[in-house]
Image (cartoon, rainbow, N blue to C red):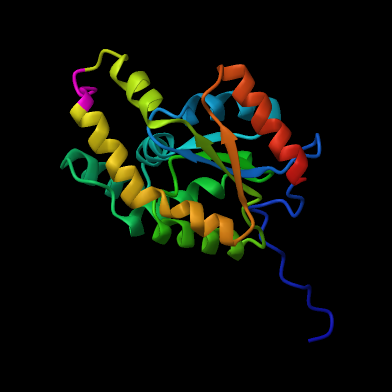
Amino acid sequence: MAGEAEPAKSPDMAPNDMTPNGMPSRVLLFGAPGSGKGTQAALLAERLGVPAISTGEMLRAAVAGGSALGRKVDAILAAGSLVDDATMGEVVRERLARADARRGFLLDGYPRTIPQAATLEEILRRHGAGLDAAILLEVPEAELVRRLTSRGREDDREDVVRERLRVFDEKTAPLIGYYQQRGLLRRVDGDRAVPDVADAILDTLRRAA
């Protein structure tokens, strides 16, 4: 009808998918346990000016928010259960809609499986956006075992660590092919000093720009 205003576009995500320094801004960091994802996410978030968002951070934020979704997550965690894919998808959707993630984010720990990757793709598509790069941190298994068993935690025995690596190979490693098919996969050698790995990731993102 003449005179009617057009519906406003969703403000949740900015149309520009680059950070102010011209780098891709919607990035997934993944790799086996002990590969250094969390450490790199924190470093790179500061350098890129976008938030580092981990699975744990998202769940804690949802609970602290006190929403119906937060109360649902709280009940699941209080029961000692794993958060199911559908609920986790709701948590991710809510977190990525926040103002600090409008210009981008560094995801650490999500997605872990192909179904979760498809959910993330759908969430971003609804906002007219997409993932810019999926950075795989590659570290030899012997080094992963060394790193994890040297932390001194009770649950970091070698048999437990190797089981965690087995689960990664079974559940998360298929994401390599998933993102490779989409032209988003970038491999980075994570068996180096922390600053060197961070520099390598930034170089990889510059080339992807």
Q: Residue at x 55, y 20 (%)?
A: 192
Q: Quadrant of the C terminus?
A: top right
Within the image, what quadrant is residue 124 found in? bottom right
Q: Residue at x 73, y 49 (%)?
A: 17
Q: Residue at x 20, y 30 (%)?
A: 160
Q: Is residue 80 among the parts visible in the rendering?
A: yes
Q: Position of residue 207 (x, y in %)?
A: 76, 41
| Region of the chain picked out in magenta, as a range | 154-158
Query: As drawn, is 193 to the left or to the right of 159?
Result: right
State the residue lying farthest toward the bottom.
1
Number of dots carrying numbers:
0
Comparing 37 with 207, the one in front is 207
Q: Position of residue 184 (x, y in %)?
A: 62, 53
Q: Main secondary structure of the magenta part?
A: loop
Q: Residue at x 75, y 55 (%)?
A: 15
State the residue lying farthest toward the left.
79
Q: Is residue 66 magenta?
A: no
State the residue lying farthest toward the right.
3
Relative vertical location of residue 106 with respect to residue 93 in this rendering, above or below: above
Query: As drawn, is 116 to the left or to the right of 184?
Result: left
Relative vertical location of residue 74 with respect to residue 193 in this rendering, above or below: below
Within the image, what quadrant is residue 182 found in? bottom right
Q: Position of residue 176 (x, y in %)?
A: 49, 51
Q: Position of residue 4 (x, y in %)?
A: 79, 78
Query: As drawn, is 31 to the left or to the right of 40?
Result: left
Q: Quadrant of the N terminus?
A: bottom right
Comparing 134 with 109, the one in front is 134
Q: Is residue 49 among the parts visible in the rendering?
A: no
